[in-house]
Image (cartoon, rainbow, N blue to C red):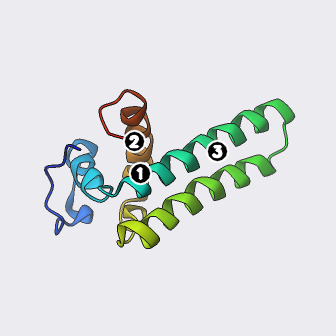
Amino acid sequence: MPTTAPTHADPAQMHSFAEFYPFYLSEHQNRTCRRLHFVGSSLGLVCLATLLATGNPWWLLVGLLCGYAFAWIGHFGFEKNKPASFKRPLYSFMGDWVMYKDIWTGRIPF
């Protein structure tokens, strides 16, 4: 899995997503953690589709809970680190979807 950022990097000091993403990947080296992210993101998309189909706004909350619950279980239980969303929530959210795409395209092993 490609990673160039040192694990001691401070995401709060990063000024672009391009600078942040290698750090983000370095925080997702554990395969089970990445798989949990992938499952949570997939369930989040299912919830988004259900929201659009039903118009019920509760599906947005369920989708966010699915995404974050699976990711945090991956970090605390398998990766043994704190999610990057605690320091850079927007970049972390973006990183999750770029990693999701990279898993789908085979750039990152599932």
Dot 1, how many residues are within 10 Å of its Cα: few (below 14), some (14-19), or many (20+)? Answer: many
Rendering quarter of residue 50: top right
Closer to the camera, 19 or 41? 41
Q: Label 1, label 3: how many angstroms apart (C-alpha)?
A: 14 Å
| Residue at the spot of label 1 | 34
Disc 2 marks which residue? 110
Q: Using the image as rendered, state which of residue 58 and residue 29 is in the foreground.
A: 29
Q: Are marks 1 and 2 in contact (CB under 8 Å)?
A: yes
Report the mark closest to the observer, 2 or 3: 2
Give coordinates of residue 76: x percent, y percent. 44, 72
Q: The residue tagged with tag 3: helix, strand or loop? A: helix
Query: Callout 3, which amino acid?
Result: Leu
Residue 90 in the image: above or below residue 18: below
Query: Is 91 in front, or is 66?
Result: 66
How many angstroms separate mark 1 from mark 2 (CA)? 7 Å
Write the residue at 80% across / 46% down: 57
How many angstroms separate mark 2 from mark 3 (CA)? 16 Å
